[in-house]
Image (tube, coloured by chain):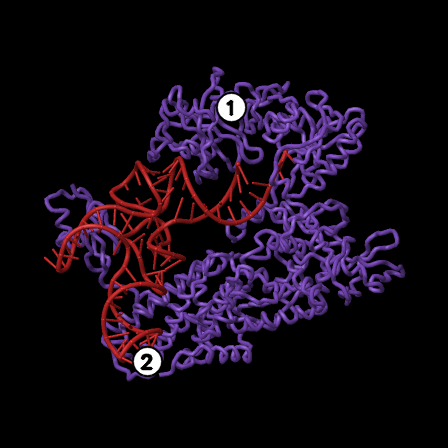
Amino acid sequence: MKRYNPSEIEPKWQNYWQQHQSFEASEKSDKPKMYLAEMFPYPSSSGLHVGHVRNFMIVDVLTRFNLALGHNVMRPFGYDTFGLPAENYAIKTGTKPADITKENIAGFRNQAERLGFAIDWSREISTSDPEYYRWTQWIFARLFERGLAYKKQSAQWWCPFDKTVLANEQVENGRCWRCGNEVEKKHMSQWFFKITEYADELLSEIDGLDWPEKIKTMQRNWIGRSVGAELEFKVEGEKNSIKVFTTRPDTIFGATFLVLAPEQANVVKITTDDQKAEVLRYIEKSAKKSEIERQENKDKTGVFTGAYAINPATNQKIPIWIADYVLSGYGEGAIMAVPAHDERDYEFAEKFDLPITQVIRPLVAGEKVDNAVKRHVINAITRRPSDGKFLLVKWQKFDWISPVIGGIEDGETAGEAAEREVFEETGYKAKFVRNLGGEVEKYFFADNKNEWRYAISQPVLLELTDETPESVSAEEKAIQTPLWLTLDEALEQITHPDNRLGLELYQNGVKSFGLEGTMMNSGQFDGLPSAEAREKIVKWLAKQGIGREKVNYRMRDWLISRQRYWGCPIPIAYDSKGQPHLIPDDQLPVLLPEVDDYKPDDSGRSALAKTGDWLKVTIDGEEMTRETDTLDGYACSSWYLLRYADPHNSGQAWDRKKVDFWNPVDVYVGADHAVAHLLYVRFWTKVFADMGLLGFREPVKKLLYNGYVNGPDGQKMSKSKGNVVNPLDVIDSGYGADTLRTYELFIAPFEMDAPWDTAGVGGVYRFLTRVWNLVQEFLEAEKTTLSGQDRQDLQKIQHKTIKKVTSDLRRQSFNTAVAALMETLNYLNKAKKAGFDDDLWSVLLIDFVKMLSPFAPHLAAELFEQLGGAGLPEAAGWPEWDEQYLAEDNVKIAVQVNGKLRAEVEVATDADEATVQAAALQNDNVQTFAKGKKILKTIYVPNRILNLVVK
RNA sequence: GGGCGAGUGGCGGAAUUGGUAGACGCUGCAGACUUAAAAUCUGUUGACCUUAAAAGUCGUGAGGGUUCAAGUCCCUCCUCGCCCACCA
């Protein structure tokens, strides 16, 4: 018998795929299209390790599965080649980055081929190829024309080691994402893409994406939309006024001082002579302060400017301070400080002894305010210790949502009470979604007799439905457990030192209270609910021309210039006045010039600045100087998914017909870039759609975010930890690519991290060997004819497996699909003892091999050929199951007595309850527990379980 | 501080809608083959109790609840992981 030898069959089939161009995709097909891609890799010199290759394996399984299902599958491959590692290596060794890159690509391609990936190699692209970056430059030009690429002087993150600026997304905990050194702020003139123009659409369309919730949440947080108002404060003795952004304009009567960021443009202008020296010293000091210092030490610091502003609500003079807790890049870089209702302002006011005015008091029992919102976040309180009555408070947590107050009935859960309250207050029927986190907030509030009360709140999330309102009766609801709190327990908590402090602070009216409540100390607005006052105050200020509604985003524009050599040159030149001009399209690409020294210096300019002649360019008869910055690598990777559809087009970036045929990507797989890359790709797609270059607005339909394979020690694989496992080593050690692939998909669900386990690889190898041996035995055996029952059993297992594996693959449950194949093989190895029936077994084994082919394509192709199949298993179609074979004559029913499993009885499928019960009562063990007792009730789930309730 | 996840044997993990917890694999143990070892094959492998066999008790981070029935639903608590973090 021939032995399973991966080193023999794997090269054979890899050659076959190559020669037959088995995976080349074409638009000329009437099959439904399916575009699958992984996030393309940066080809490093050390090659791929087994942690990297997992997302390629996932895409490969999907590719081969969908091919077999009869889809027209496009699965391309490419390389994200611009970037620092190649350049740093060039600096060290003097090798050209282009040469290094070429070598690394060859290494990556070799690895991909030896892993047996089903790739359409005719679509191989690389972002540093002039034929590719020519179009990256073309796209830059179009963005420039639309005003979406602009140059701005501003303070930016600067990595002193890599000597380049970085985007916000590339600064991780105050450190450079590439080299890990601390970054600093540097004032420079830099290129930006105006991603904020698309912030609203980028945010709102997240909801409709079939992406992991985690990624969607991260994107939402990153965009960070907040609704509020922009208010103007006159500076005493100056013409100018200072604009501030706030989400709580309702607290304006409590604004007792202003704070500007040290970098804010107005600072120097308004500072009085007395304070100038101190202010300048502070500005200098905070510029030097690294991000890490700021994060580690959040103690408030600041300096008085000597200037005063006028609070437009109270007409009082309020001091203007500068402090680095106000960020220059957000809003106007200035805030109105309301210490009574903002914790940070409170801390600052305490430290520098600034006045604190309370303008909102917490809600009082019985107070009601308006509502009518689609989504509420509601905090339900348990009950007041005084009278034992439950109380429900709902306060605004997002944007302009209004609070309601009411009672929780005994026997209601917080969620139910909230549902009922919302109905009573709004007429909307609300559905309880879930509790928000396990944290319970404790706080004090004054009731309508102005007595201090203690309460516990629990946030719940409700969703208002569009159903016709109908009365919601609490009695009808199942009684759930309320958060009972006895009087004693509540009193114990009220006297707890932590809470007493809170009580005192409230009684003194000074603790910052950031929630909704009722207006006080606010002139004509007193007594109004804060949410209502918020809108009225903005209108009031708007009438005077000093306030307006405003939406702000946490997200900043995308900084795209880099002072490095190995990137896509920005197609811009400057005239004698320093105005930027586009390099005309017919002069693209702007090729990266050859240089001797790649090293950036401290000039803040890239190595391109030292190229002499290259810098000169004539546009429309005028001599100009070229831009020496290159583009962020993320720009290059923001459109490659489109280029794959039309990779060799030399006349345009892509042919819209081809892109509209293949894109958007049906499934995109990756394990990194949760925010930056995925947000940029979405941004550009929307821009291209607005330009009429394509007919869709979201680039990726489904996103799969896979976990890593870690080292045997459970740590993330890295060269420095010495726990790297090279896939080629695993293949060459005799296991082969099929074992490696199957193993990586078998060890854990694809989205989970899993440690590399050498013994586990052996187990998968044994499985594949047993498959091979079984087929050899079948081919060599003398065939027999099987009896009816044996035939039926085999067919049943065959169809059961097809059903299981197919549905597992459809829901991306690769590990259980492999487990199902293993289980089936174990069964077949026992069943073979009855002899091999030729026609039955050959169909069965061919189906088995087809199902194995997404995981172990070489072995599957080889066995498929041995079994007489023509061509590749993927081309022969995916096996289908027939429910008729799955029908069982008899089923085993679990019999429980009082909920405990006592026996198993075998009855005819779909037997009625009486029959099953009779059979169950025949059972000795059931008798032991049921004898002499009365059967109160039986619960019967057909074909599954019978539960006898006896007493 | 905010947000999002997750806790199941010695290990990786399974249980798709509340319905027989621990599929599949690894490890360990026992046996077969072998002069021997490796490889391979067979059996076994949650804990406890008892054993001739059958059965029984406990068991999915902890505690409570709902239910005929809970890994799954509800409440409280604990632990871990990831992301964001002075965003007004």
Q: Nearer the viewer, residue A555 or A443?
A: A443
Quadrant assignment, res A883: bottom left
Where residue A915 appears, x then y in whole percent? 17, 54
Q: Earlier in the sequence, mark 2 or mark 1?
A: 1
Q: Residue at x 67, y 54 (%)?
A: A687
Letter of the chain that mark 2 sits on in the rendering? A
Which residue bears the numbered disc 1? A363
Spatial CA span between label 2 and label 1: 80 Å
Name the amino acid, label 2: Glu
What hue does chain B carry in this figure? red
Viewer-closest of A131 and A569: A569
For the colour purple, the matching chain is: A
Left or right placement of residue A344 versus residue B66 in this view: right
Crowding around mark 2 (Cα neighbors within 10 Å: few <14, some 14 to 19, many 20+) is some
Locate residue A678, reporting x and y percent: 59, 54
Splitting the image into 4 quarters, where does residue A18 fall? bottom right
Give the residue number, with chain letter if any, for mark 2: A777
Quarter of the image with the C terminus of chain A in it: top left
Residue A1, placed above or below residue A807: below
Q: What residue is drawn where x is 19% and y is 57%?
A: A905
CB contact under 8 Å: marks 2 and 1 = no
Residues at discs 2 and 1 both on one chain: yes
